[in-house]
Image (cartoon, helix red, strand yellow):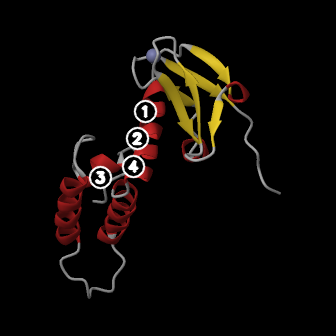
Amino acid sequence: MAMNLSNESFYDILGVSQKASTSEIKQSFQKLVLQHHPDKQAPSLSADEEHIHQLLKAWKVLRDPESRRAYDQVIKSQQLKQGAVINEDVDLDDMDYDEETGSFSLPCRCSGVYTICETDMELGVNTASCDNCSLIIRVLYDVVEDD
Ligand SMILES: [Zn+2]
């Protein structure tokens, strides 16, 4: 029976914790690929094939620190939708833009900084958490779509 993977995070798919190091994730990925694909010559498209596809997708995101960080933000924002408290709404125009990192930031009253980067926003993230305390803001921005 094929597993329904749609509700699993990439960490679940790779059987690692969210705190796992890249090498731990890599080990688990390689082990799982071998389990599900013992014969690389097999030409048939099976449930295993689908699972391999999921593993590759998950690994591709988590092996890269930048995309992993962005993915963690997505998870965080999904968790937020399930009940965390938003401290305040902030207009993107009111945040400082750093061209070098492609990120917007805003000082928190605790002396920490809220940061959200363009990559996050492209993934649909609209919350930024303070790097120092547990406060969260919702960033209001218009999605600009190319014609
Ligand atoms: Zn703070």
Q: Is residue 122 above or below residue 87?
A: below
Q: Tell me where residue 123 appears, x and y as whole percent.
A: 56, 46
Whether residue 81 is visible to the viewer of this picture, yes or no, is: no
Q: Is residue 47 above or below residue 117?
A: below
Q: Which residue is mark 4?
A: 68
Which amino acid does the dot numbered 3 rest on? Ile
| Residue furthest out toward the right | 147
Whether residue 5 is visible to the viewer of this picture, yes or no, is: yes
Q: Which residue is mark 2?
A: 72
- Could you say which is closer to the camera, residue 139 or residue 7? 139
Q: Tell me where residue 69 appears, x and y as whole percent.
A: 41, 44
Cα–Cα gap, marks 4 and 1: 12 Å
Q: Earlier in the sequence, mark 4 or mark 1?
A: 4
- Report the residue at 33% width, 82% height from top: 44
Q: Do callouts 2 and 1 mark residues in contact (Cβ within 8 Å)?
A: yes
- Could you say which is closer to the camera, residue 65 or residue 97? 97
- Report the residue at 35% width, 65% height from top: 56
Q: Which residue is mark 3?
A: 13
Which amino acid does the dot numbered 1 rest on? Lys
- Report the residue at 38% width, 62% height from top: 60
Asked which secondary structure carries label 2, the reply is helix
State the image quarter where residue 133 is shown: top left
Q: Do callouts 2 and 3 mark residues in contact (Cβ within 8 Å)?
A: no
* Other-residue count near label 4 (Cα within 10 Å), few / some / many at <14 / 14–19 / ≥20: some
Which amino acid does the dot numbered 2 rest on? Asp
Asked which secondary structure carries label 3, the reply is helix
